[in-house]
Amino acid sequence: MLSRVADSLYWMSRYLERAEHTARVINLQLSLMLERGTGSDDAYWAHVLRTLGIELTHDEAAKAQTLAVSLVKESKHRASVVACVIAARENARQVREQISSEMWEQLNRLFHSVRAREDGEVWDAREFLQSVKEGSHLFQGITDSTMTHGEGWQFIQAGRFLERTVAVSSLLMEHFRDLPQPRDESDPVHLEWIGLLRACTAFEAYCKAYTADLKPDRIAEFLVLNPSFPHSVRFSAGALEHAVREIGREVSERRSSRVERIAGRLHATLSFGQIDEIMNTGLDAYLETVLKQCGQVHAALHQVYIAYPIEAALSA
Protein backbone atom coordinates (compact mmCIF):
# COMPACT_ATOMS: atom_id res chain seq x y z
CA MET A 1 0.00 0.00 0.00
CA LEU A 2 1.25 3.50 -0.83
CA SER A 3 2.42 5.41 2.24
CA ARG A 4 0.17 8.40 1.42
CA VAL A 5 -2.87 6.10 1.33
CA ALA A 6 -1.96 4.51 4.66
CA ASP A 7 -1.40 7.95 6.18
CA SER A 8 -4.77 9.28 4.99
CA LEU A 9 -6.72 6.23 6.19
CA TYR A 10 -4.98 6.33 9.55
CA TRP A 11 -5.65 10.04 10.12
CA MET A 12 -9.18 9.88 8.75
CA SER A 13 -9.95 7.35 11.45
CA ARG A 14 -8.14 9.23 14.22
CA TYR A 15 -9.89 12.51 13.46
CA LEU A 16 -13.32 10.91 13.37
CA GLU A 17 -12.73 9.08 16.65
CA ARG A 18 -11.55 12.37 18.17
CA ALA A 19 -14.67 14.18 16.96
CA GLU A 20 -16.92 11.48 18.43
CA HIS A 21 -15.10 11.49 21.77
CA THR A 22 -15.15 15.29 22.05
CA ALA A 23 -18.85 15.42 21.14
CA ARG A 24 -19.67 12.76 23.74
CA VAL A 25 -17.73 14.45 26.57
CA ILE A 26 -19.14 17.92 25.88
CA ASN A 27 -22.68 16.63 25.45
CA LEU A 28 -22.40 14.93 28.82
CA GLN A 29 -21.18 18.16 30.40
CA LEU A 30 -24.23 19.97 29.06
CA SER A 31 -26.42 17.30 30.69
CA LEU A 32 -24.60 17.56 34.02
CA MET A 33 -25.07 21.33 34.06
CA LEU A 34 -28.80 20.70 34.40
CA GLU A 35 -28.28 18.35 37.35
CA ARG A 36 -25.65 20.23 39.33
CA GLY A 37 -26.41 22.78 42.00
CA THR A 38 -24.61 26.06 42.35
CA GLY A 39 -21.01 26.31 41.26
CA SER A 40 -18.69 27.97 38.80
CA ASP A 41 -19.47 26.87 35.26
CA ASP A 42 -16.01 28.03 34.19
CA ALA A 43 -14.41 25.74 36.79
CA TYR A 44 -16.39 22.76 35.49
CA TRP A 45 -15.58 23.58 31.87
CA ALA A 46 -11.88 24.04 32.67
CA HIS A 47 -11.92 20.50 34.06
CA VAL A 48 -13.66 19.21 30.91
CA LEU A 49 -11.15 20.90 28.63
CA ARG A 50 -8.26 19.35 30.57
CA THR A 51 -9.82 15.91 30.17
CA LEU A 52 -9.73 16.53 26.41
CA GLY A 53 -6.01 17.23 26.59
CA ILE A 54 -6.29 21.02 26.32
CA GLU A 55 -3.96 22.78 28.73
CA LEU A 56 -5.20 26.14 30.04
CA THR A 57 -3.37 29.15 31.38
CA HIS A 58 -4.79 30.90 34.45
CA ASP A 59 -6.44 33.55 32.26
CA GLU A 60 -7.90 30.92 29.92
CA ALA A 61 -9.32 28.92 32.85
CA ALA A 62 -11.29 32.00 33.89
CA LYS A 63 -13.13 31.95 30.56
CA ALA A 64 -13.24 28.19 30.03
CA GLN A 65 -16.93 28.18 29.11
CA THR A 66 -16.24 30.51 26.18
CA LEU A 67 -13.36 28.28 25.06
CA ALA A 68 -15.67 25.27 25.22
CA VAL A 69 -18.03 27.02 22.81
CA SER A 70 -15.24 27.29 20.26
CA LEU A 71 -14.44 23.61 20.79
CA VAL A 72 -17.91 22.73 19.57
CA LYS A 73 -18.56 24.91 16.59
CA GLU A 74 -15.53 26.84 15.34
CA SER A 75 -13.57 25.22 12.53
CA LYS A 76 -10.61 27.52 13.30
CA HIS A 77 -10.03 25.62 16.57
CA ARG A 78 -7.96 22.61 15.51
CA ALA A 79 -9.38 20.39 18.26
CA SER A 80 -13.02 21.33 17.69
CA VAL A 81 -15.67 18.83 16.65
CA VAL A 82 -16.20 20.66 13.36
CA ALA A 83 -12.47 20.86 12.57
CA CYS A 84 -11.99 17.14 13.26
CA VAL A 85 -14.88 16.13 10.98
CA ILE A 86 -13.55 18.43 8.24
CA ALA A 87 -10.06 16.92 8.59
CA ALA A 88 -11.45 13.38 8.48
CA ARG A 89 -13.41 14.14 5.33
CA GLU A 90 -10.37 15.75 3.65
CA ASN A 91 -8.26 12.67 4.34
CA ALA A 92 -11.04 10.46 2.97
CA ARG A 93 -11.28 12.63 -0.16
CA GLN A 94 -7.63 11.97 -0.92
CA VAL A 95 -8.16 8.19 -0.93
CA ARG A 96 -11.69 7.84 -2.31
CA GLU A 97 -10.58 4.96 -4.52
CA GLN A 98 -9.53 3.00 -1.41
CA ILE A 99 -12.78 3.28 0.54
CA SER A 100 -16.29 2.21 -0.37
CA SER A 101 -18.78 4.62 -1.90
CA GLU A 102 -21.05 4.08 1.13
CA MET A 103 -18.24 5.20 3.46
CA TRP A 104 -17.64 8.33 1.43
CA GLU A 105 -21.35 9.17 1.26
CA GLN A 106 -21.76 8.84 5.03
CA LEU A 107 -18.69 10.91 5.87
CA ASN A 108 -19.67 13.53 3.29
CA ARG A 109 -23.16 13.66 4.79
CA LEU A 110 -21.70 14.19 8.27
CA PHE A 111 -19.35 16.87 6.90
CA HIS A 112 -22.18 18.89 5.36
CA SER A 113 -24.24 18.47 8.52
CA VAL A 114 -21.57 19.97 10.79
CA ARG A 115 -20.80 22.78 8.33
CA ALA A 116 -24.48 23.70 8.21
CA ARG A 117 -24.63 23.87 12.01
CA GLU A 118 -21.34 25.74 12.42
CA ASP A 119 -23.07 29.09 12.89
CA GLY A 120 -25.72 27.78 15.28
CA GLU A 121 -26.00 28.55 18.98
CA VAL A 122 -23.79 26.18 20.97
CA TRP A 123 -26.14 25.93 23.97
CA ASP A 124 -28.75 24.50 21.64
CA ALA A 125 -26.13 22.06 20.42
CA ARG A 126 -27.04 18.83 22.22
CA GLU A 127 -28.90 17.50 19.21
CA PHE A 128 -25.96 18.51 17.02
CA LEU A 129 -23.45 16.71 19.26
CA GLN A 130 -25.67 13.63 19.35
CA SER A 131 -25.81 13.64 15.55
CA VAL A 132 -22.00 13.72 15.40
CA LYS A 133 -21.80 10.71 17.71
CA GLU A 134 -24.37 8.77 15.72
CA GLY A 135 -22.81 9.79 12.42
CA SER A 136 -19.43 8.52 13.57
CA HIS A 137 -20.89 5.22 14.80
CA LEU A 138 -22.73 4.79 11.50
CA PHE A 139 -19.51 5.40 9.57
CA GLN A 140 -17.70 2.75 11.63
CA GLY A 141 -20.47 0.24 10.99
CA ILE A 142 -20.53 0.98 7.27
CA THR A 143 -16.73 0.64 7.16
CA ASP A 144 -16.85 -2.78 8.78
CA SER A 145 -19.64 -3.92 6.47
CA THR A 146 -18.53 -2.58 3.09
CA MET A 147 -14.72 -2.51 3.08
CA THR A 148 -12.44 -5.49 2.59
CA HIS A 149 -10.74 -6.26 5.89
CA GLY A 150 -7.28 -5.99 4.42
CA GLU A 151 -4.34 -3.69 4.99
CA GLY A 152 -6.30 -0.44 4.49
CA TRP A 153 -9.01 -1.48 6.93
CA GLN A 154 -6.34 -2.37 9.49
CA PHE A 155 -4.83 1.13 9.23
CA ILE A 156 -8.31 2.50 9.97
CA GLN A 157 -8.53 0.27 13.05
CA ALA A 158 -5.04 1.27 14.18
CA GLY A 159 -5.95 4.95 14.00
CA ARG A 160 -9.27 4.45 15.73
CA PHE A 161 -7.94 2.46 18.69
CA LEU A 162 -4.75 4.44 19.17
CA GLU A 163 -6.84 7.61 19.39
CA ARG A 164 -9.23 5.91 21.82
CA THR A 165 -6.42 4.68 24.05
CA VAL A 166 -5.02 8.20 24.28
CA ALA A 167 -8.43 9.83 24.80
CA VAL A 168 -9.64 7.52 27.57
CA SER A 169 -6.27 7.59 29.35
CA SER A 170 -6.25 11.42 29.34
CA LEU A 171 -9.85 11.50 30.54
CA LEU A 172 -9.10 9.17 33.46
CA MET A 173 -5.93 11.00 34.48
CA GLU A 174 -7.73 14.31 34.90
CA HIS A 175 -10.76 12.86 36.69
CA PHE A 176 -8.70 10.93 39.22
CA ARG A 177 -6.43 13.92 39.71
CA ASP A 178 -9.28 16.39 40.32
CA LEU A 179 -12.02 14.41 42.07
CA PRO A 180 -12.07 13.16 45.68
CA GLN A 181 -13.74 9.90 46.66
CA PRO A 182 -17.51 10.39 47.18
CA ARG A 183 -18.77 10.05 50.77
CA ASP A 184 -22.24 8.84 49.78
CA GLU A 185 -24.84 9.21 47.03
CA SER A 186 -25.86 12.66 48.31
CA ASP A 187 -22.33 13.96 47.83
CA PRO A 188 -22.19 16.18 44.70
CA VAL A 189 -18.94 14.43 43.74
CA HIS A 190 -20.97 11.24 43.28
CA LEU A 191 -22.54 12.81 40.20
CA GLU A 192 -19.09 13.52 38.72
CA TRP A 193 -18.06 9.85 39.03
CA ILE A 194 -21.27 8.83 37.28
CA GLY A 195 -20.36 11.41 34.65
CA LEU A 196 -16.96 9.77 34.13
CA LEU A 197 -18.59 6.41 33.43
CA ARG A 198 -21.15 7.98 31.11
CA ALA A 199 -18.37 9.85 29.29
CA CYS A 200 -16.90 6.45 28.43
CA THR A 201 -20.33 4.94 27.58
CA ALA A 202 -19.65 2.64 30.53
CA PHE A 203 -22.26 3.31 33.22
CA GLU A 204 -24.58 0.41 32.39
CA ALA A 205 -21.72 -1.99 31.72
CA TYR A 206 -20.06 -1.02 35.01
CA CYS A 207 -23.29 -1.56 36.95
CA LYS A 208 -23.66 -5.04 35.46
CA ALA A 209 -20.12 -5.88 36.58
CA TYR A 210 -20.05 -4.16 40.00
CA THR A 211 -23.62 -3.03 40.72
CA ALA A 212 -24.27 0.69 41.17
CA ASP A 213 -21.84 0.98 44.09
CA LEU A 214 -19.43 3.62 42.78
CA LYS A 215 -15.92 3.16 44.12
CA PRO A 216 -13.03 4.93 42.37
CA ASP A 217 -10.79 1.83 42.51
CA ARG A 218 -13.45 -0.26 40.80
CA ILE A 219 -14.09 2.46 38.22
CA ALA A 220 -10.37 2.59 37.48
CA GLU A 221 -10.18 -1.20 37.20
CA PHE A 222 -13.12 -1.31 34.81
CA LEU A 223 -12.05 1.55 32.55
CA VAL A 224 -8.35 0.71 32.51
CA LEU A 225 -8.05 -3.07 32.75
CA ASN A 226 -11.33 -4.61 31.55
CA PRO A 227 -10.43 -6.89 28.59
CA SER A 228 -13.84 -6.94 26.92
CA PHE A 229 -15.36 -3.46 27.27
CA PRO A 230 -14.79 -1.52 23.99
CA HIS A 231 -13.88 1.79 25.66
CA SER A 232 -11.46 0.42 28.24
CA VAL A 233 -7.80 1.26 27.79
CA ARG A 234 -6.81 -2.42 27.76
CA PHE A 235 -9.38 -3.39 25.12
CA SER A 236 -8.30 -0.49 22.89
CA ALA A 237 -4.62 -1.35 23.26
CA GLY A 238 -5.39 -4.98 22.38
CA ALA A 239 -7.29 -3.96 19.25
CA LEU A 240 -4.39 -1.66 18.30
CA GLU A 241 -1.86 -4.46 18.71
CA HIS A 242 -4.01 -6.79 16.57
CA ALA A 243 -4.28 -4.20 13.79
CA VAL A 244 -0.52 -3.56 13.84
CA ARG A 245 0.20 -7.29 13.70
CA GLU A 246 -2.15 -7.77 10.75
CA ILE A 247 -0.54 -4.86 8.89
CA GLY A 248 2.84 -6.49 9.51
CA ARG A 249 1.74 -9.62 7.65
CA GLU A 250 1.60 -7.55 4.45
CA VAL A 251 5.19 -6.25 4.63
CA SER A 252 8.60 -7.64 5.44
CA GLU A 253 9.04 -8.98 8.97
CA ARG A 254 12.17 -6.87 9.45
CA ARG A 255 10.27 -3.64 8.83
CA SER A 256 7.20 -4.46 10.89
CA SER A 257 8.79 -6.10 13.94
CA ARG A 258 9.64 -2.81 15.66
CA VAL A 259 6.06 -1.52 15.51
CA GLU A 260 4.65 -4.85 16.67
CA ARG A 261 7.11 -4.99 19.56
CA ILE A 262 6.15 -1.52 20.85
CA ALA A 263 2.40 -2.16 20.44
CA GLY A 264 2.82 -5.53 22.15
CA ARG A 265 4.62 -3.91 25.08
CA LEU A 266 1.75 -1.42 25.47
CA HIS A 267 -0.82 -4.22 25.51
CA ALA A 268 1.28 -6.28 27.94
CA THR A 269 1.53 -3.30 30.31
CA LEU A 270 -2.26 -3.38 30.56
CA SER A 271 -2.82 -7.15 30.35
CA PHE A 272 -0.62 -7.87 33.36
CA GLY A 273 -1.60 -4.82 35.40
CA GLN A 274 -3.16 -5.30 38.84
CA ILE A 275 -5.39 -2.50 40.09
CA ASP A 276 -4.09 -2.66 43.69
CA GLU A 277 -0.50 -2.20 42.53
CA ILE A 278 -1.50 0.52 40.08
CA MET A 279 -3.41 2.55 42.68
CA ASN A 280 -0.65 2.13 45.29
CA THR A 281 2.07 3.34 42.95
CA GLY A 282 -0.17 5.98 41.37
CA LEU A 283 -2.72 5.79 38.56
CA ASP A 284 -1.33 9.07 37.23
CA ALA A 285 2.14 7.61 36.66
CA TYR A 286 0.71 4.41 35.19
CA LEU A 287 -1.39 6.27 32.63
CA GLU A 288 1.52 8.58 31.84
CA THR A 289 3.44 5.44 30.86
CA VAL A 290 0.52 4.30 28.70
CA LEU A 291 0.40 7.69 26.94
CA LYS A 292 4.17 7.64 26.39
CA GLN A 293 3.93 4.19 24.82
CA CYS A 294 1.06 5.38 22.61
CA GLY A 295 3.33 8.12 21.37
CA GLN A 296 6.01 5.52 20.62
CA VAL A 297 3.52 3.38 18.66
CA HIS A 298 2.45 6.39 16.60
CA ALA A 299 6.07 7.39 15.91
CA ALA A 300 7.02 3.85 14.91
CA LEU A 301 3.98 3.47 12.64
CA HIS A 302 4.86 6.72 10.90
CA GLN A 303 8.52 5.85 10.54
CA VAL A 304 7.98 2.30 9.29
CA TYR A 305 4.93 2.73 7.03
CA ILE A 306 4.63 6.42 6.18
CA ALA A 307 8.00 8.17 6.13
CA TYR A 308 10.32 5.23 5.46
CA PRO A 309 13.34 5.81 3.14
CA ILE A 310 13.11 4.47 -0.41
CA GLU A 311 16.00 2.09 0.29
CA ALA A 312 13.86 0.30 2.89
CA ALA A 313 11.08 -0.24 0.34
CA LEU A 314 13.48 -1.53 -2.29
CA SER A 315 15.12 -3.98 0.08
CA ALA A 316 11.80 -5.29 1.44
Image: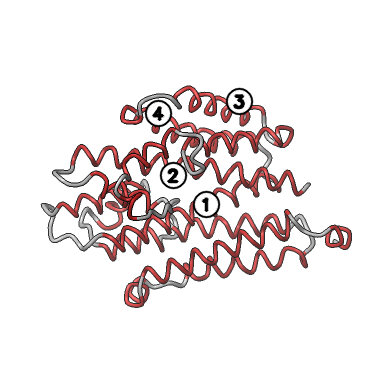
> Between tags 3 and 2, which lies in front?
2
Q: In which quarter of the image is residue 175?
A: bottom left
In the picture, the disc for residue 210 is none
- Specify which label sits upstream in the sequence, 1 or 4: 4
Amino acid of disc 2: His
- Specify which label sits upstream in the sequence, 3 or 2: 2
Residue situated in front as seen by the camera: 271 or 107: 107
241 in relation to 42, above or below = below
Tell me, yes or no, if residue 228 can be seen here.
yes
Q: How far apart are marks 3 and 1 (CA)?
A: 23 Å
- Specify which label sits upstream in the sequence, 3 or 4: 3
> Between tags 3 and 4, which lies in front?
4
**Identity of the residue drawn at 74% across and 56% down:** 307
Residue situated in front as seen by the camera: 43 or 115: 43
Which residue is identified by label 3? 105
Which residue is identified by label 2? 21
> Between tags 3 and 1, which lies in front?
1
Amino acid of disc 3: Glu
Answer few, some or many: residues within 10 Å of disc 4's Cα (few below 14, many 20 plus, some between 14 and 19): many
Which residue is identified by label 1? 163
Q: What element carries label 2?
A: helix
Percent position of residue 154, x then y? 65, 49
Q: Is mark 1 on a helix, strand or loop?
A: helix
Amino acid of disc 4: Phe
